[in-house]
Structure formats: structure tokens, C-alpha cells
Amino acid sequence: MAYEAKDFSNLLGMEGFSDTLLNNHFTLYKGYVTNTNKALELLASMLKEDKVGYEYGEVKRRLGWEFNGMRLHELYFGNLGGKAPIDKNSTLGKKMAGDFGSCEAWEKDFKSVGAMRGIGWVALYQDTTSGRLINFWINEHDVGNPAGCVPILIMDVFEHAFITDYGLKKADYIAAFFKNVDWKAVQNRMK
Ligand SMILES: [Fe+2]
């Protein structure tokens, strides 16, 4: 069963994000969906033909990159489109305060990860073993996602996510991102 690209056109018109930037980003996301399907189909046919040598290994390596590129973008677009700030008395707000000292401390940590030099993703994960919330830096889609943890809030900090509208002003993009987080969708991801 092939993966299908989800429609995030409901985000068009979002404050601080031009339609040009968003449409380009949707196109890029669709490329990951196409290539995830391509890698899976290729691997299945190679397996069938007993071609499980060097080439098989190389496509297998690419699968993690394409799949996570697809899924991280879905999580990113899926946690946008909100209008209200985080409710500190919500389950998520209280959990953040419990794990980081305060919601503000969580936000400072998350934004500081976003400000790191380099391209990648900032990801708030919940460790299902301990229940703890931890902000992670994911350098490449397929590297740095913590095992056994659930993605709660995902922010894309590859340059294509902001350079069209913000040039090199990544902090301004991060501020715009925070204005549009759908905190209810974020909280619904918690276990
Ligand atoms: Fe992206």
C-alpha cells in the first residue's frame, strides 16, 4: 500500500508564512512521499529477485531518510494552524512546567535548539518509558530521533522552511512559528 501525500493547504494564509514559501514546502514534502514509495517498491522487487547485495543496502539506507523526511514534515505541518498561545493549565502546559521548571524554560530550551548553527529539526519528544519531555536536535531526518519516544512538537529549521520569507533571520521565523502552533494538536500527541 503506497503512502499518499496529505493536504495541508488549510495552512495557506497563515500569518507570517507566504503562500509561495508554503507551496514550495508542500512540493518538497510530496517529494519525500514519492521517494518513500519508490524506495519501498524498489526494495520489495529486489528482495523478490534475490538482489539483496550492495545496491539493496544502499536503497535501504535511503529509506530512513525518505520516510522520516515524509513523516517529520507531516508532523510539522500538522502542528501548525493554531491561533492561541499555549494554555499553561493544560495537561501539556503542566507537564512542561513539571519537566522543565516552567513553560517559559521549556520554550527557551526549544528556541535555543532552533537557534543552533546548522540545518535540521527541533523536536519535542515524550519518552514513553519515563513519560519525560525532552527537546532534541535532529540533524538529518534519519539521525537523532530517539528510540521509543513519541514526537510531540516538530519545527523544521532547514533553510527552505524560512529563507523565502525571512532571509537569514531564523529567530524571526521561529517567532512566527510559535504564533501558529496548534497546541491542541500538540497535546493530543501526548501519551
Ligand atoms: Fe522542510
Image: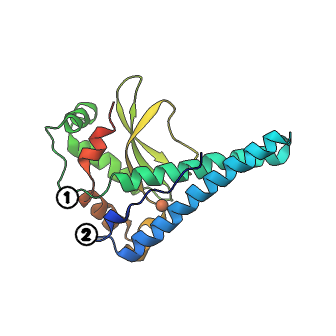
Q: Residue furthest top?
A: 129
Give percent across and percent down for residue 189: 34, 38
Whether residue 118 sits left or right of residue 126 in the image: it is right
Q: Secondary structure at mark 2?
A: loop
User: Residue 170: which quarter of the image?
Assistant: bottom left
Identify whether 17 is placed above or below 55.
Answer: below
CB-based contact (under 8 Å), mark 1 and mark 2:
no
Q: Count numbered badges in the picture.
A: 2
The amino acid beneath tag 1 is Lys
Q: Quadrant of residue 135?
A: top left
Q: Which mark identifies residue 60?
A: none
Task: Give me the residue at 46% from left, 47% from top.
Answer: 137
Q: What amino acid type is highlighted by mark number 2?
A: Glu
At a point 41% along the width and 46% down the height, the residue shown is: 123
Q: Secondary structure at mark 1?
A: loop
Ranked by sequence position, the earlier of labels 1 and 2 is: 2
Q: Is residue 82 above or below residue 169?
A: above
Q: Give the residue at x 60% y 52%.
A: 66
Image check: 45 left or right of 135? Answer: right
Question: Which class describes the residues within 10 Å of circle 1: few (<14), some (14-19), or many (20+)?
Answer: some
Q: Label 2, on which residue? A: 15
Q: Position of residue 106 (x, y in %)?
A: 28, 43
